[in-house]
Structure formats: C-alpha cells, structure tokens
Image (cartoon, grey):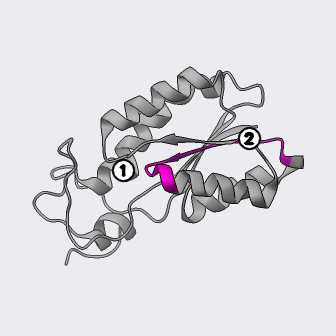
Amino acid sequence: MKVLVTGGSNGMGKGVAKILAGTDNQIHEIIILCRSKERGEATIKEIIAITKNQKISIVLCDLTKLSDVRNAINEIHSKHKFLDGLFINAGIGYAAKRVETEDGMDSHFQVNYLSQFMLTLNLLDLLEKSENGGRVIFNVTKGGEILWDDIQMEKKWGYVIYCISPILPWL
C-alpha cells in the first residue's frame, strides 16, 4: 500500500506512519506531508531505524498557505501514479487567539478543513487508480458549530467553541 499521511511528523500522524511502515514485512510506502524539512527528515530516520522500511518520503507543505497545498498536490502527482490511502490528520490545536493566514482565512479553518479538503479533492484521481480501492481516513474529534453567518469567526472567535464541542454555549 502507498499511503499519504498529513501531519505525519508529529503526534497521531507520526504514530500511524510508524505502524503502517512496520506492518506486513515493511511493504508499505509512506509519504509524510509536513511543513518542516528538518522534522520530516528526522521522522524518516526514526521510522527507518524502528521499522527497517526504506520506502518513506516527505512532501513539504505548510497548510496555512494554499500555494503550498497546490505545490504539494503537483509534487505528489508528478512522483506517484496512484495512492492507496490518504490519512488526513494534520491540524491546529489550541490557540489563544484568532490568527489569519496569508490567504485571509482563519488559520484553524484553513488548516483543519479547507487545505485538507483541497488536498483530498485534488488527489481523488490517484486514489481512484489504486488497485486496492483507495481510501480516505479523516482523524476527527467532536466538531464545533458551523457559524454560517461568520464562517471565518471574525465577529466572535473562541477556540473551545470552534474546535471542540458543538454543545457548549457561546462564552
């Protein structure tokens, strides 16, 4: 299997990359999407040392930049004829305040949703070419409320409400 893992240099994504790289006699190819070359290369070394699987690579992409997402999509298409799986894991956790990206989006909205959607949508053709039936797996937690009249949360921003629980009242 050939699997792309977003957020694969840290946390759960890194754990998934390690597990997949080490199973089935190390036959799986793992592509780690991450924003830091240093962290990505360190993760590759760590996974190879643990699993002995040499089929680990990185694609650099800062999900707070839609231009990076487009470049990552193009790089993946140029290097791979198919994907068997896409593990959508990267995300921004807690933040004390709203941060706007260079694209004019709330960073949580862009990283946790918009960039992941753009990536997934533009890699569906590679998943369709999988002989194993391409799969997309989303690592999600309990979601927040979608504020259709303030989708960028410019009027009222709150991390807990935005990212954690749809049942908490507005603070």
Mark 2 / mark 1, whichever is N-terminal: 2
Give the residue furthest to the bottom: 171
**Number of labelled discs?**
2
Q: Circle 2 sits in a helix, a strand or a loop, which is it?
A: loop
Q: Amino acid under label 2?
A: Lys
Identify the residue under disc 2.
Answer: 55
Q: Magenta part of the protein: which range?
A: 26-38
Identify the residue under disc 1.
Answer: 111
What x and y, as percent, mark residue 39? 51, 57
In the picture, measured across the screen, residue 121 lies left or right of residue 47, that is left
Q: Nearer the viewer, mark 2 or mark 1?
A: 2
The mark found on residue 5 in the picture is none
Gap in angstroms between the C-alphas marked 2 and 1: 27 Å
- Image height check: is 84 above or below 43? above
Can residue 165 be seen here? The reply is no
- Image height check: is 67 above or below 41? above
Which residue is at the front of the view, 158 or 28? Answer: 28
What x and y, as percent, mark residue 127? 63, 28
Q: Circle 1 sits in a helix, a strand or a loop, which is it?
A: helix
Can residue 128 be seen here? The reply is yes
- Image height check: is 147 above or below 57? below
Q: Amino acid under label 1?
A: Val
- Residue 55 belongs to magenta span: no
Which residue is at the front of the view, 27 or 41? Answer: 41
The residue located at (54%, 62%) in the rendering is 10
